[in-house]
Image (cartoon, rainbow, N blue to C red):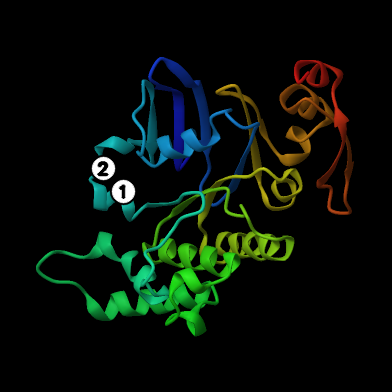
Amino acid sequence: MAILEARNVAVSIGDKPILKELSLAVAQGEIVSILGPNGSGKSTFLKALSRNIKLKAGTITLDGRDIHSFGAKEIACHLAMLHQASRAPGDLTVQDLVEYGRFPYQQWWKGNEKEDRQVVEWALAQTRMTDLSARRVNTLSGGEQQRAWIAMALAQKPRILLLDEPTTYLDLCHQLEIMELIRQLNKEQGLTIVMVLHDMNHAARYSDTVAVFCQGSLYASGAPVNTITPTMLREVFGVEADIWLDDQGRPVCLAQSLTAATQHSSR
């Protein structure tokens, strides 16, 4: 059974449909990357999975249970969401930020300070942020800030991590650093990962499943070798591309040009 499943999900903003009867199942322990053009509904879908936007139709279940039947703290113990380019208040240290991740486990009259401290230390260590824990978040590099936010999410001890464009604004070195961290957390901690990406090659290299969105609908879902294809890139992105397989059978994508239809529509 899928750990997280969307069935016929529809979302509208005002009168504009954003998601159109979209269904997608996520298996326990897999990495799912969502690809699609701007405006295809990728970020909206993550917001729907994390209960940050109202559904017009359809259901989303966690372990077969409707996610809207969970209390706020209860759902936060199962699922953590990191939005695009998150910002921390100016005086907040990394330690402070990560401690916020323990909020779902704290009661107003008491908290398990020893356990909270141990989990925070563990989250900092997992993300290699221990030596930076006293630094203010806004003084860190882009890659360090992203690791700090991931540490906060880890402090929730979730089973599922939702990431909206986790490599946005990062240089290539820090992009790979974040992607390697995500894979490490998946393999060593058993975290189920659902993330929105724009880089085809990152998706091909690090994902078990790639879901391709197009105009609010699911165009394709499956192994990267079956979803990242010249036909998909032509039909969904309007791009002509060469694709070959690396020595591990993963697709590598090199965009060559816009399709004739895309060139015509952009004039």
Q: Amino acid at mark 2?
A: Phe
Q: What amino acid is labelled 1 in the image?
A: Ile
Q: Dot 2 surroundings within 10 Å: few (below 14), some, or many (20 or more)?
A: few
Q: Is residue 172 left or right of residue 190?
A: right
**Mark number displayed over residue 75:** 1
**Left or right of 262: which side holds 56?**
left
Residue at mark 2:
70
Instruction: Examine the rendering and report whether any part of residue 250 can be seen.
Output: yes
**In the figure, is residue 146 to the left or right of 250?**
left
Label 1, secondary structure: give it: helix
User: How far separated are the C-alphas under marks 2 and 1?
Assistant: 6 Å
Classed neighbour count for the residue bearing mark 1: other residues with Cα under 10 Å, few (<14), some (14–19), many (≥20): some
| Residue 84 horizontal/vertical position (percent) | 51, 49
Q: Quadrant of residue 88?
A: bottom left
Relative image position of residue 234 (x, y in whole percent): 80, 25
Closer to the camera in the image, 193 or 52: 52
Pointer 2 with pointer 1, Cβ within 8 A: yes
